[in-house]
Image (tube, helix red, strand yellow):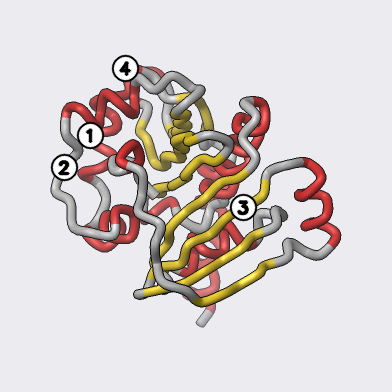
Amino acid sequence: MRDTTMRQILERLVRSFWRHRVTIRAIRPDDRERLVQAFRALDKQSIYQRFLFPKRELSDTELRQITECDGVRVAALVATVGSGDQQVIVGLGQYARSGATADIAFTVRENFRGWGIAQRLLRRLVRLARAQGISHFTADVLADHRPMLRVFRRSGLPVQESQSHGVVHLTLALTEEDAQAGALRGGAIATESRPFTHPRPASLDYLGR
């Protein structure tokens, strides 16, 4: 029992050490190979949770769309550990805009989950989106992907949800007034059940969650 407790303490210390050394920054064109390696490091379940279908690799077009995004119509942030040529991408958050709404998605490497990386990415993307005049985020998440659902539900933003065929469609209000009202209500969640009629924009086919 004592050995188990000591091992748990050491694991928490290691996680805390690396958590404070995760950098959130804008993606760059020279991240292309890092992104390829990050995708290859994901297991099949993580890929399915993100894309809602099996996927073997990112195409050249997809890699270019991510690493060379304009920061206006499409914005992407990465979470990295290490420095210089030793940087490794362990998380990706990105949105693609359509009018005043943007579809958002995340990927965090399995052994870096539970570190608050997705929450940090979401907070930064919210600030970027507000500066661009975006009023709402939308996202499609598998109903059994509870960790990602918690990220959105605990964001402090008002959330509306609908579910069909095992997929939860979420809409988050980003305006300051709505966010303040949501915070006062504890991040109110409205739910409903209706047919799933929210196909993902083609511009988000390559995103990672």
Q: Are marks 1 and 2 in contact (CB under 8 Å)?
A: yes
Identified at 61% across, 63% down, the residue is 160
C-alpha distance separating marks 4 and 2: 18 Å
Query: Please, which residue is most extreme toward the bottom here?
Result: 1
Mark 2 Cα-neighbour bin, 10 Å: few <14, some 14–19, many ≥20? few
In primary-sequence order, the first of circles 1 and 2 is 1
Which secondary structure lies at badge 4? helix
The image quadrant of residue 91 is top left
**Mark earlier in primary sequence (2, 3):** 2
| Label 4: how many Cα within 10 Å (few below 14, some 14–19, many 20+) | few
Q: Residue furthest right?
A: 184
Name the residue carrying label 3.
Answer: 172
* Residue at 17% across, 51% down: 55
**6 sits left or right of 54 in the view:** right
The residue tagged 4 is 30
Residue 41 is situated, as x and y percent measured from the top left of the image, at 25, 46
In this view of the protein, which residue sits in the foreground, 18 or 115?
115
At 36% across and 44% down in the image, what residue appears?
201
- The secondary structure type at the circle numbered 2 is loop
Q: Position of residue 50 (x, y in %)?
A: 34, 54
Q: Find disc 2 in the rendering and name its residue.
A: 57
- Left or right for 154, reference 35: right
Mark 1 touching mark 4, by CB under 8 A? no
Of the residues shown, which amino acid type is indicated by label 1? Val
Q: Earlier in the sequence, mark 1 or mark 4?
A: 4
Which residue is under mark 1? 36
Query: Between marks 1 and 2, how big is the CA–CA gap?
Result: 8 Å
Local packing at callout 3 (Cα closer than 10 Å; few below 14, some 14-19, many 20+) is many
